[in-house]
Image: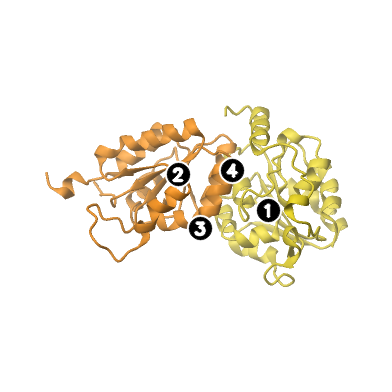
Amino acid sequence: MNDAARAHLSPEVVLNQLKQHGVTHVVWLPDSETNWLYLLMKADPSLTLVAVPREGLACSVAAGLAVGGAVPVILIQNTGLMESGDSIRGWLFGLEIPVVLVVGMRGWTRHGAPTADTASVYTEPFLNAFRINYYLVESDDDAGRISVAFNESKKSRRPVAVLVGDEYQFNG
Amino acid sequence: MFSTESFLKAFLPHRGDAIVVPGRGGKHWVKISDQPDLDLPMGDPAMGGHAAFAFGLALAQPKRRVVLFDSEGDVQMGLGILLTIAEQKPANFYHFMLDNECYATTGGQPVPNAKNVNYEMLAKGAGYPRAYSFTELDAVVAALPEILGKPGPVFVAMKVHADVENKPIGERVRWRKRSWTQVIGDLQRKLGIAA
């Protein structure tokens, strides 16, 4: 098997993980890593998509949803994650909101190849600074880590991140 | 202009069984409310997020009316959420905004373009089906039955006097008597939500 085949991450697998954990609302701002997932989610009547124009707002929307008994997931890019710092601090950590942030890793190169895009360079230091645990998902074989993130978040009542290290592949 | 406290007292008889997120009006509302288990006096977890938080709550509890007392400083900081709210159209969401034209908790410095922003127009432009502006207490109180008698989302901008605080934070009177965990737990128990 070559690297490309091993790296395959299908949106169906990710969506199945979200549904396994009872997700009711996807609070999100699109990125290239999640576009095909968007098309699947949009067609799924059990999910409500809540689009926000700035990622920090996703944190406070998700906090309200969780307090009200819904099960949100936040779907954003790493650039937006970094924009969201104070909202993560106040609304997610402050209110002890159990929520998973699925974060597209713009600029991520699996084998550490040089890239001019600095977004991924700062992502892990940012997560570590905020003491947010994270799990890298690059292929369908890694999908179980999404469940690990959901279970950890629920148990700890903290935000936990899933880093998506591959653009989704379309199987249609 | 009128005082925040006078408006909140006038609002109380119209509350019904709504969940109230009192936002910047919290320090007055906690002394006025007669249903604290349905209140979420959060103080300021992170500025700019009150509308998004209350909106999320409204989505999660579509059969329960959610009332927010927002501020113009928070609205300015999280302006984009107006578009999201307008798109989702939560019929149970009632968005009141207390506009004192300044950052009262940091000493009263004016918000950007403090005296010239038309928030009613901003809300309508974002897509809110209904929006209002008031500068007099009598007028807003008279309009409350209409405002609350129709489905949301609705936006209500009100000019209020500023309660400016200049003392160092450590010397201020702490008005929140319950922690965030307690407030959320009390609401969830009242609503029958398993934490």
Specify whether disc 1 shares its chain with disc 3.
Answer: no
Residue identified by numbered label 2: A132
Query: Can residue A50 be seen here?
Result: yes
Q: Residue at x 76, y 45 (%)?
A: B174
Frontmost residue, A170 versus B47: B47
User: The residue under label 1 is which amino acid type?
Assistant: Val
Specify whether disc 3 shares its chain with disc 2.
Answer: yes
User: The residue under label 3 is which amino acid type?
Assistant: Arg
Q: CA distance from mark 4 to mark 1?
A: 29 Å
Q: Which chain is orange?
A: A
User: The residue under label 2 is which amino acid type?
Assistant: Ile
Residue identified by numbered label 3: A54
Which of the two discs, 2 and 1, sits closer to the camera?
2
Frontmost residue, A106 versus A67: A106
Residue identified by numbered label 4: A94
Tell whether B93 sits left or right of A89.
right
Q: What is chain B's hue in the picture?
A: yellow
**Mark 2 or mark 3, which is nearer the start of the sequence?**
3
Q: Quick one: SS at disc 4?
A: loop
User: In which quarter of the view is residue B99 placed?
Assistant: bottom right
Q: On residue B154, which mark appears? A: 1
Which chain letter goes with mark 3?
A
Q: Residue at x 36, y 38 (%)?
A: A146
For this orientation, the residue located farthest to the left is A1
> Around disc 4, counting alpha carbons within 10 Å, would you say few (fewer than 14), some (14 to 19), or many (20 or more)?
some
Q: CA distance from mark 4 to mark 3?
A: 20 Å
Q: Quick one: SS at disc 1?
A: strand
Which chain letter goes with mark 4?
A
Q: Residue at x 63, y 57 (%)?
A: B128
B64 up-or-down from A85: above or below: above
Q: CA distance from mark 2 to mark 1?
A: 36 Å
